[in-house]
Amino acid sequence: MRRVLPLLLIAVGAAWTTLAACAGSARWWGAAGPLLALTALGVRDLVQRPDALLRAYPLTGRLPFVSRRRDDGRPGAAGEFLVSSLAPAEPAEEPPVVRVGGPDCRLPYDMALLNVSAMSFGALSPRAVLALNRGAALGRFAQDTGEGGLTEHHLRGGGDLVWEIGTGYFGCRTGEGRFDAREFADKAALPEVRCVSLKLSQGAAPGGGALLPGVKVSASVARERKVPVGEPVVSPPGHREFSTPRELVLFLAWLRELAGGKPTGVKLCVGSRREFLAVCRAMVAEGVAPDFVVVDGSEGGSGAAPPYAGEVGLPLTEGLITVHNALVGVGLRDRVRIGASGGVATGADVVRRLAQGADYTNAARAMMRAVGCVGTGRCHTNTCPVGVATQDPRRMRALDVDDKARRVHAYQRETVRDAVRIMASMGVRGPAGLTPAHLVRRTGPGTVRSCAELYEWLEPGALLSGPPESWAADWKAADPDGFS
Ligand SMILES: Cc1cc2nc3c(=O)[nH]c(=O)nc-3n(C[C@H](O)[C@H](O)[C@H](O)COP(=O)(O)O)c2cc1C
């Protein structure tokens, strides 16, 4: 009610002054005219669908102090350039996809170049989850469920899903908060579930677990997560089902079997290179590899980020290059796909990450903007004015699912199209043609150097056959039976 109060007052003023003018005192038209015009504008704001902020705040949503908050949150890439070619290629007609699924996978999945990154029901409203899912169905890309469970809202739109399992095991959780294999297998068998992702950590809070504030734990969220209504949900910082790199890769292999051979991978924000090398050693020792690794940069977002967000863990560039090199170094890069998330929003962002070693990308905050997020930074308060990050039924009404699903689809399609056009302007027809030499950085006045020169790139199998000096100490210390 408070949100439409200014419009109501203006409408009452318009009615009153119009009556006064009609009653014979023509000078009232001077006030009635502008008030009538404002009323008409406010009603238009209220009934239109594309702009959720104006729908929720007719008239006042136009004020500069409200709209100024519409920041796009995108970290800039100042000083980094993609290398264009004097021999451009023809852009590919079909959007490229990358096949995810190594030799132990029985149901490989063709992943789009840009997908919806993990965001839970709970952090997002049911309408936002559904709009993302319908958008994914329209554009044939994937939506990651986030760690809050595989819910009815993820299954209503017909979109492809990556089911994320976090440390709380929501959606496949025993009464004691442990992993429930039977529930997992039953849900993983659903045709909408195309891949399974085991979340080890995320960039906004690596090693910190996740928090859903009590104010957002509605009856429906509580039911999906099997937790009490209104109490904060804290996912533990680490997993209880494994405690060493070897146990981790064996757990992944088990998940893949339980999921009927669907592609199974991990999501992590890299901290120490040695730890990731320990996981690679375990893969080699057990002959088991994930089908994909999603690398999240420390610049990543969250529904309720701790104050140290961005200060802990490797930024995406360093994390991505570390994971790519480690997998190349142990000779597993050709069977493990790499996804990248952290500030991906444009076609150029996608191409930049592909050039640095990723096979595909995921976006969270850019997809939130596509469903109407205006960046007020109130995700943790349940007062999101545009219905994206709230469980308040009145507030979520502002989000029109069909309209936002079309926007999500259009955003993904145009971003991938841009990526394809950019690759063509660089003389390559698809992601396979990109190398670190295609990305250059200004390193001083008048000097640029490519990522191929700025970073070290390992030869296939180099870690197994004799690591270069710069990797030798970490490789030697990496222990498949201990993370530290
Ligand atoms: C509202 C919100 C909720 C999120 N929830 C999860 C989650 O449940 N699991 C997860 O792995 N990451 C989660 N993330 C992190 C994103 O999936 C992504 O890794 C990170 O935000 C970086 O991508 P971006 O820069 O495109 O936002 C969440 C992010 C946001 C903004």
Image (cartoon, rainbow, N blue to C red):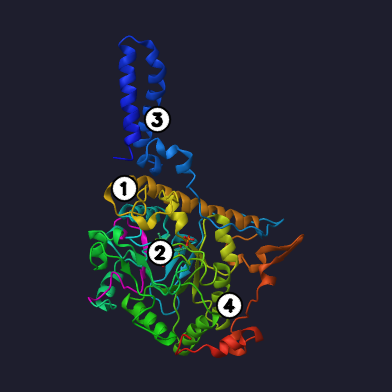
Residue on which disc 1 sits: 395
> How far across and down, in percent of the image, does residue 306 sit?
43, 65
| Cβ at disc 2 under 8 Å from ligand 1 | yes
**What span is colored magenta in the figure?**
154-175
Element type where label 2 sits in the image: loop
The disc at residue 325 is 4
Element type where label 3 sits in the image: helix
Characterize the local packing of mark 2: few (<14), some (14-19) or many (20 or more) Cα atoms within 10 angstroms: many
Q: Tell me, yes or no, whether the two marked residues, 1 and 2, touch with CB atoms within 8 Å.
A: no
Between marks 4 and 1 in the image, the one whose residue lies nearer the viewer:
1
Instruction: Tell me which residue sits at (45%, 76%) in the image.
Output: 102
The type of residue carrying mark 4 is Asn
Element type where label 4 sits in the image: helix
Q: Quadrant of the N terminus?
A: top left
Q: Tell me, yes or no, whether the two marked residues, 2 and 3, touch with CB atoms within 8 Å.
A: no
Between marks 4 and 2 in the image, the one whose residue lies nearer the viewer:
2
Residue on which disc 3 sits: 41
Q: Which of marks 4 and 2 is nearer the N terminus?
A: 2
In the image, taking residue 312 as reference, residue 408 lies left or right, namely left
